[in-house]
Amino acid sequence: MTVYILGTLDTKGTEVEYVRDLLREFGLTTCVVDTGCLGEPTITADISREAIFEAAGGSLTEVRKKGDRGNAVTLAATGAAKIIATAHARGDVSGVLSLGGSAGTTIGTSAMRALPLGVPKLMVSTLASGQTRPYVGSKDIVMFNAVVDIAGLNRISRTVLSNAARAMAGMVKLPSSVKHESEKQDRPLIAATMFGVTTPCVERARQVLEQAGYEVVVFHATGIGGEAMEGLITDGMFAGVLDITTTELADELVGGILSAGPSRLTAAGRKGVPQVISVGALDMVNFGAPDTVPEKFKGRKFYQHNATVTLMRTTMDENRKLGEEIGRKAAAATGPTVIMIPLKGVSAIDQTGKPFDDPAARDALCEGVRATHGAVELFELDCHINDAEFAEAAARRLLKLLDQ
């Protein structure tokens, strides 16, 4: 098993060599991958830059001829991802470590995102203290702040790089047989989605599922949470899905900050995984502090969740569209699927006397689902989403699908 080290060896050769030598001192096998294209490499790579661009369907000669740095980075990222994925498929990747600035981070994390959960992935980056979602996505990538520019070895960069090498060595060398007591009895996994305003429902449902012998993994429906769940469903991690909180669909439709993208609510259906779908927190769209709400929403109904979270009530029209989307996506599922709707409210603040109470919007949501769900079973319960009755019914319905 090998630790792959990615870097542009024309500009980061010295630093890559330093990390490589440390990993070798720690008893690890290494493979240096050159992702550069402009100057000449300062150390010898195990996988050349020519091989990287060929894997992406191009050539180093063509890239140099065009002189387009953006295109070069895109191709290098594609090629590196393909080479790392291929190496992993043949069982030869124990970890991936990369270092660089914006281009190196784009290339290195592209390769890391091609790997499944659990393979150690460490990116030493000058961008690690900023917005990292474009690089990390839904993967378990460690972003290691370079602190200084990766442009030569000095007292600070040596400290950072040596710590990064030690971290990678620790992740790779710690025996996989060393497990916490709770890991020793693996049970089938259930994915569930939760928001603060649907917590009582999901917590009660989890108790029912755990009593039935399942382990429940809860994803916070904050955009990246839904994205991570969809990815892990695609990877085959889950026996079933309890998608109580589909709120990210509202952010995608209306333009909030917690969207999980247009493919949300598709992975379980595509994989044939049994799923129970509900409409949790579709009464709201998420924004940051009040001054971050776009001007076009002036006049809408808002609720200040806290100083940095502003919630906007979805309208009747938006609810109808959301219901239609849920129905369509459920109807396209290839596996056992059920939709469950609580008629008395979809979140803690959508019920009688609460800020987002809106019976007409709830009715529109139901109408949308009814119009598109096709042959998928639809259950409408005369209770609130956080009532124990609804939570238990949803959990038991999923257990029934799993038994089938």
Image: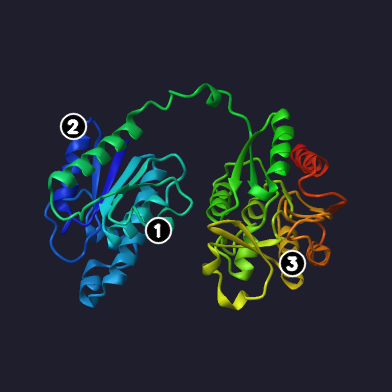
At x 18%, y 47%, the residue is 157
Pointer 3 with pointer 2, Cβ within 8 A: no
Question: Residue placed at 36% from the left, 46% from the top?
Answer: 87
Mark 1 lies on residue: 131
Task: Please name the amino acid that badge 1 sits on.
Answer: Gln
Residue on which the image places disc 2: 25
Mark 2 or mark 1, whichever is nearer to me: 1
> Spatial distance from mark 2 to mark 1, Cα to Cα?
34 Å
Q: Which quadrant of the figure contains the N terminus?
A: top left
Disc on the earlier residue, 1 or 3:
1
Residue 319 bears which disc, if any?
Answer: 3
Q: Is residue 82 visible?
A: no
Q: Secondary structure at mark 2?
A: helix
Relative horizontal placement of residue 296, taking residue 359 as reference (left or right): left
Task: Classify 10 Å Cα crowding around label 2: few (below 14), some (14-19), many (20 and above).
Answer: few
The secondary element bearing badge 3 is classed as helix
Q: Earlier in the sequence, mark 2 or mark 1?
A: 2
